[in-house]
Amino acid sequence: MKSLVLDSVSSPITKRVYNMALDEFFSWYAQEPRPGFTKATVSAWRVTLEERGLGSSSIIVGMSAIRKLAVEATDNGLNTKGVCPADATRLSIDSRTL
């Protein structure tokens, strides 16, 4: 799934920043039970970024990576409702696509 996001952007800098942002999100997501890849989860992630004291531009870039993740999942017909795209065992798709 992460490769869909990274392959969809052309700038090497954007790829690097999105890669880091997605790694941080997936790590945070795995730390405790979450309701899935939902609006509430994404909002909680934003609050976490704000609590870390990140600047607004850093938060915007991080959230752009998450937004791109949702777009790519939808565009590629992957069922992300209520699940985290990093969690292949809970997706109703072949885990090789992640």
Image (spheres, rainbow, N blue to C red):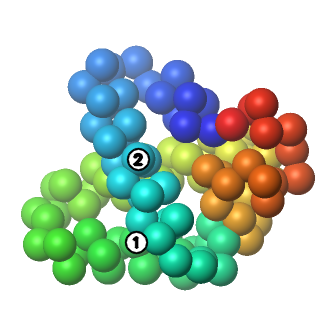
* Residue at mark 2: 23
Give the Cα separation between the discs numbered 2 and 1.
13 Å
Q: Quadrant of the N terminus?
A: top right
Classify 19 as above or below 49: above
Three-letter code for the amino acid on which mark 1 is drawn: Trp
Check disc 1 and report its element: helix, strand or loop: helix
Q: Position of residue 68 (x, y in %)?
A: 51, 45
* Residue at mark 1: 45
Viewer-proximal residue among 10 and 44: 44
User: Would you say the residues marked 2 and 1 are in contact, meaning their CB atoms lie under 8 Å apart?
Assistant: no
Residue at left 71%, top 65%? 83
Q: Determine crowd level at label 2: few under 14, some 14-19, many 20+ residues with C-alpha closer than 10 A.
A: some
Viewed as shown, does residue 43 lie left or right of 11?
A: right
Q: Quadrant of the C terminus?
A: top right
Check disc 2 and report its element: helix, strand or loop: helix
Q: Position of residue 25 (x, y in %)?
A: 42, 58
Q: Determine crowd level at label 1: few under 14, some 14-19, many 20+ residues with C-alpha closer than 10 A.
A: many
Viewed as shown, does residue 14 lie left or right of 75?
A: left
Classify 37 as above or below 43: above
Q: Which mark is residue 84?
A: none
